[in-house]
Image (tube, grey):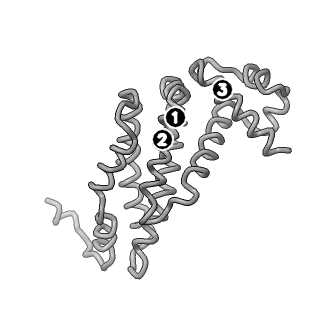
Amino acid sequence: MGKTTKDALGESLKRLLLHTTLDKITVKDIVEECGVNRQTFYYHFQDIFDLLSWVFIQEANKTLQENRTCNTWKVGFLQTLCYIKEHKKLVLNVYRSVSRETLERYLYYATYGLLKHVIEEEAEGMCVAEKDKKFIADFYKYAFVGLVLEWIRLGLKEEPEEIVIQLGTLIEGNLKKDLQKFNQKRPVIQRKDLV
């Protein structure tokens, strides 16, 4: 029952976001749309931002579940972009509201999850420290999310397939090269070496 109620609250929020920005939606609006009381809402979520984060994480997990490998990451990223484009009104209403941070966190979560698995696969047989793998994943995560946020800011005009083709062309083979750079003991850099 708990998951069903959470799903229903999430669907209500998504329906409301088709018509207005998040900063104009109240818990009262959500529970009335859903047909439950405020107590039920607060049993599951701290506030509207908590609900929105939960919705985005559920969507990311569905979208990326099967597409976190070297051979399938493009499909996962394409599905994420297609989800954003299919839910354009909802995404733009979140982007234009006070919760833009929530959208950014969703994108960081989805992208990092995708990249981390790919990096682990590419690093197989190498001796790369976890902190270095995280650094590489973070580097690409920020690049990917920056592109997506700019795409959203400009109104999602470019087709998702075009973006994925460009990204694929740009990073094809680069993850492995980046990992190989970290696959050896690096010299200690001293301050005097930087001058």
- Residue type marked 1: Glu
Q: Residue at x 26, y 73 (%)?
A: 188
Dividing the picture into quadrants, the one containing residue 191 is bottom left
Dividing the picture into quadrants, the one containing residue 17 is top right
Q: Quadrant of the C terminus?
A: bottom left
- The answer to whether 126 is drawn above or below residue 89 in the figure is below
Q: Nearer the viewer, residue 187 or 1?
A: 1
Residue 82 numbered tag: 2
Residue 96 image position (x, y, % from top left): 48, 23
Q: Secondary structure at mark 2?
A: helix
Q: Earlier in the sequence, mark 2 or mark 3?
A: 3
- The answer to whether 93 is drawn above or below residue 49 in the figure is above
Circles 2 and 3: CB atoms closer than 8 Å: no
Q: Residue at x 76, y 20 (%)?
A: 28
What is the total number of numbered labels drawn onto the structure image?
Answer: 3
Q: Is residue 130 left or right of residue 7?
A: left
Q: CA distance from mark 1 to mark 2?
A: 6 Å
Circles 1 and 3: CB atoms closer than 8 Å: no
Report the residue marked by disc 3.
15
Kindly report which numbered mark, 2 or 3, lies closer to the viewer in this rendering.
2
Q: CA distance from mark 2 to mark 3?
A: 18 Å
Q: Earlier in the sequence, mark 1 or mark 3?
A: 3
Residue 86 numbered tag: 1
- Residue type marked 3: Arg
